Amino acid sequence: MEFLRQILSEAGADTLHAFTVVPSFGAYFKGVKAVTFFSPTRIELTSGAFRMAVSGSGLRVGRYYMGDLFVAGSVSGVSVE
């Protein structure tokens, strides 16, 4: 975990606004302020000052609680704006 903190620190980021993608299973996001759009192929959300779009197939909001979001389905990409 210390290695991850070092990398994020050097990039000017933190672990409060991060995400992990597990192929063919879904994705986990931290620091989500809102889910602004969702469909089986695209989910849009805001985290901090960023907007993100998750693309894939069979996507659904698996769980959203206190800024933590689990997206179930086959995630093929995440874009950050």
Image (cartoon, rainbow, N blue to C red):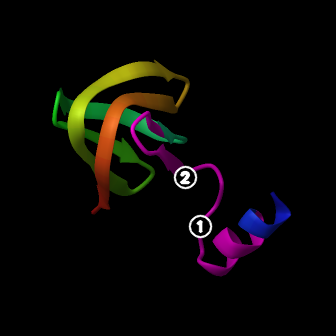
User: Which segment is the magenta one?
Assistant: 5-27
Q: Is residue 7 above or below residue 65?
A: below
Residue 75 visible? yes
| Element marked by disc 1 | loop
- x then y, percent, for residue 53: 26, 49
Residue at the image point whose x is 29% and y is 54% from the top? 77
Assign the N terminus to one quadrant of the image: bottom right
The front one of 9 and 23 is 23
Work out whether residue 52 can be spotted. Answer: no
The disc placed on residue 18 is 2
In the shown orientation, is residue 53 left or right of residue 63?
left
Q: x, y percentage for residue 42?
A: 18, 39
- Residue at 41% across, 19% down: 62
Whole-percent x and y of residue 71?
39, 31
Residue at (43, 33) in percent of width and height: 25
Q: Quadrant of the C terminus?
A: bottom left
Residue named by callout 1: 13
Determine the CA span between mark 2 and mark 1.
8 Å
Residue 62 left/right relative to 65: left
